[in-house]
Amino acid sequence: MEMGKLGQLVVPAMGLGCMGMSEFYGAADKTRSVRTIRAALDNGINFFDTADMYGVEGANELLLAEALKGHRSRAIIATKFGVVRDSRGNVLGIDGHPQYVHRSIDASLRRLGTDYIDLYYQHMPDPSVPIEETVGAMKELVEKGKVRYIGLSNIGAEALVKAHRIHPIAALQAEYSLWSREVEQALPILRELGTGLVAYSPLGKGFLTGAIKRYEDFGEHDLRRRFTRFQGDNFRINLEIVSELEGIAREYRITPAQVALAWVLRQGEDIVPIPGTSKEERLYENMQALRVSIKPEDMAKIDRIASLCAGDFEVTSDTLETL
């Protein structure tokens, strides 16, 4: 298994995103998801990404705890706090106050059935609380042994630098794929700080797999319906781009998903993608990308294709409020 490095935290070169196992992308199948998590663990993909807001009342953390029962020592668990939801799942806001940080970690530890978290993120910055105060509270969690490493998600480079002055930031989590590359502007700063990048949605929220051919392929309650990249002319343009990727995939006798993941994996050992799936067959398909070697000229072609993508590629608090 290839390895990646997030600050001082060594993880597999690819992790498993668990969000869609509980919500957002259609009906959940708990039994299938547990089976997939255990298959990942048995095959060396032991870096699992969750959050306290994935699923109502921490459902995704509870799911991960069930799947990892008896195997906690073999797993690297990353979870997040900060997005506040009520018991019905409505988003109430963002909270980065120190007292909320301490309440959140204790709740996550209970749900996950563990006494420590390997990587703990602030999910989104709270504009009403200086980042230094939030990270100061997270630092206290490290000092108490509740957290091993600190991460931040969906945050700008300037705030990251401020946070790093309070405590080393092991990882920044941001959307990153061959068609969502805004975070590349911050990579020099991340590398100067020794902060790794955890790339969520490395398959473009599933679109880069080639499985989505029509807007109607998204279920009625699928979060992806609300992104402009999947609407109108943007959908048509992006579908043409996926068609180009499918052509490259045929040349290598692999899948478009493996092309997209191989591209991310070759951007550096400090960039770790966490493709999400609840299906074992997709897990094994994604893992094969670790063995894919793409010629430099084809990598350059993929870069050119990626520059043509259209639509929004940023998660904001406004996006979350539509949940």
Image (cartoon, helix red, strand yellow):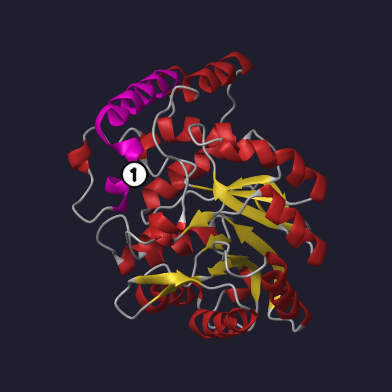
Q: Residue at the far top: name it.
A: 297
In the displayed structure, does residue 81 sit left or right of residue 54? right
Rendered residue at 36%/78% (across/down): 86
Q: Is residue 22 above or below residue 221?
A: below
Q: Position of residue 292 (x, y in %)?
A: 56, 31
Amino acid, disc 1: Phe
Q: Please name the residue that numbered disc 1 is placed on.
A: 227
Q: Main secondary structure of the magenta part?
A: helix
Rendered residue at 32%/68% (across/down): 31
Q: Position of residue 206 (x, y in %)?
A: 37, 42
Q: Residue at the far front: name it.
A: 128
The residue nearer to you, when weighing 196 against 84, is 84
Q: Is residue 239 magenta?
A: yes
Look at the image and give the residue range highlighted in magenta: 223-248
Q: Quadrant of residue 253?
A: top left
Q: Position of residue 310 (x, y in %)?
A: 40, 29
Q: Residues within 10 Å of mark 1 (few under 14, many from 20)?
A: some
Q: Is disc 1 placed on a helix, strand or loop? A: loop
In the displayed structure, does residue 96 sit left or right of residue 211? right
Q: Is residue 165 visible?
A: yes
Q: Position of residue 317 (x, y in %)?
A: 45, 58
Q: Is residue 2 visible?
A: no
Rendered residue at 75%/38% (across/down): 188
The residue nearer to you, when weighing 202 against 294, is 202
In the displayed structure, does residue 57 sit left or right of residue 103? left
